[in-house]
Amino acid sequence: VHRERPILELLGNVSSDWERCGNYGVVGWETEEAAYRAYGSDLMRFACVLVGFSDAEDLVSTTMNSLLQSDRWRTSDDMRTYAMGALARQASMHHRSFARRRLRETRSVSAISVAEPTLSDPAIWNAVKALPVRQRAVIFLAYWEDQSIAAIATTLGISSGSVKRHLTRARQSLREALDDY
Amino acid sequence: MTTNRAVDDDLTLTLRRLFAEVGDQASPAPGQALPGVRPIRFGFARIGIARFVAMLLSVSTLFIGVRVTETLFAPNEQPTLRLVDIGLLTQMARPVAPTLAFLQEASEQAKPLAVVNVARTFGFPKTLLVIDMRADFVQVELPETLSPVFEGGKLPATKHAWVRANDVRLFQTGDAIEINTAKRTLTASISGKRFTTSIAVSIGGFVESPKGRFQIFEQRLAKNPDGVFGPGELRLTARSPMLETYMGDDPYFIAIQGTNTPSLIGQAVTHGNFRLSNTAWLKLAKLPIGTLVIIR
């Protein structure tokens, strides 16, 4: 408990002008925290689209943990784009491991009740949820973030051709799903 | 209708409405649920968003978060603290008195374990890592090199001792070096900037480097910069557990050295020392004596 007290004042002989004391602000997480505070809700929205409401928080926290491990995020040109790309990459990994885990859990538990918020148009939401993760990421970036094909390709780290293909296929399956409905 | 847009069709409105609603329905981002989240100061460590994310979301990372705050000051011989995980900020004490009395307890009546002549004691880093503090006393970590150089050669029973607060001057620093012997990398944090470099490590077996928390105690520049150690070596308070001397030289202190054979960097070839490129060594040479070195 005594560690919590302002020990520096307690001891009178503190030198504050030591040559390396200036490091104090630099070694913290100020840059990352500011970015996270600014873009946190955007990341959550993207995560919900990528993996659904129940796993979104997990995904964001896993991604943040890995982003904080390296200096790349801090030094990237656009921290928001970098975080979005990392989230999409994490989502594909997340999807693989979680699909297996969910299968196990479904077998052991007869009925899982996940509290999902009710949306005004469940048909389109179900159609989006039925898409592969990569296609969800592409349609989110295209329709919500208003990004160009080239920008989406940069964010996700894939080629422009792949982006176009994902976009076409996603649009096709969404239209089919909505027409059936 | 900007030309930059990737899409422009009848789906747009439906999807935009959907994504807007998803964002409204989503729970707040982890850590943002708390009003006015600020980096928390635990002692001298600043653990901001990482700790909050860990606390709120996962039991396993919560454990890591707690462990970090605990081990920063706990008299723990295992280096559980990770430089890359948190903005590491260590509290150091520099002796201002010519002699330093190491006490077993934080009281004036305590019998000194030893009295060290700061200027003349070999292997003394001049700067000590602070473990704990009381009103008039500071608990410091005894450098391993100190043990054999006490007068009379008597080893202190503990790795930690108290010194009088008036005998030292306190300061904080973010500078540190972390060596990962498994990955064969060295990460240094110098004036807030970090860099990681590949190093040569010990061949293992009986010349394995010790693991733990150490300090730089001496910087030696080589007389011949083209020699085997390159520009010089940074001696650590770590001692080889097995080797007494090396090539008939001083006691075998583990050191961070440059090299004249860069092709060996990244391999397990040394007798316990760490060898890195000469440019990287010159960067490390800016670090002051007493800088924390974590070997894991």
Image (cartoon, coloured by chain):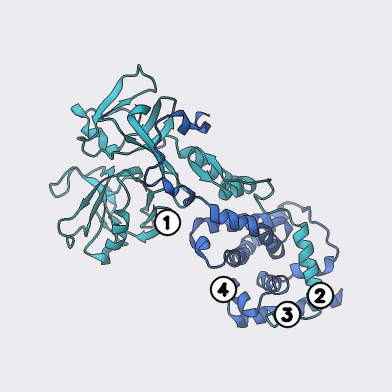
Chain colours: A blue, B cyan
Q: Chain of mark 3?
A: B
Considering the numbered disc 1 on the image, is that residue within a helix, a strand or a loop?
A: strand
Q: Residues at badges 4 and 2 in contact (C-beta under 8 Å)?
A: no
In this picture, residue A31 sits left or right of residue A166: left
- The reply to whether residue A65 is visible in this rendering is no
Circle 3 sits on which residue? B7
> Local crowd at mark 2 within 10 Å, few (<14), some, or many (≥20)?
some
CA neighbours of label 1 inside 10 A, class few (<14), some (14 to 19), many (20+): few
Establish whether labels 2 and 1 are both on one chain. no
**Rendering coords of residue A100 (x, y %):** 65, 60
Residue type of the residue flagged with mark 4: Gly
Are the residues under badges 4 and 3 in a single subunit?
Answer: no
Placement of A165 over or under A128, stated as above or below: below
Question: Where A41 falls versus A89 (above or below)?
Answer: above
The residue wearing badge 2 is: A177
Q: Secondary structure at mark 2?
A: helix
Q: Which of label 1 and label 4 is nearer to you?
A: 1
Q: Which residue is mark 4?
A: A157
Residue B289: image location, x then y, percent:
30, 45
Q: What residue is drawn where x is 48% and y is 40%?
A: B44
Q: CA distance from mark 2 to mark 1?
A: 52 Å
What chain letter is assigned to the residue under label 4?
A
Image depth: mark 4 or mark 3 in front = 3
Q: Residues within 10 Å of mark 3 (few under 14, many from 20)?
A: many
Label 1 – label 3 distance at C-alpha: 42 Å
Residue located farthest toward the top when viewing the structure as drawn: B109
Spatial CA distance of label 4 from label 2 is 28 Å
Q: Residue at x 54, y 59 (%)?
A: A67
| CB under 8 Å between discs 1 and 4 | no
Pointer 1 residue: B193
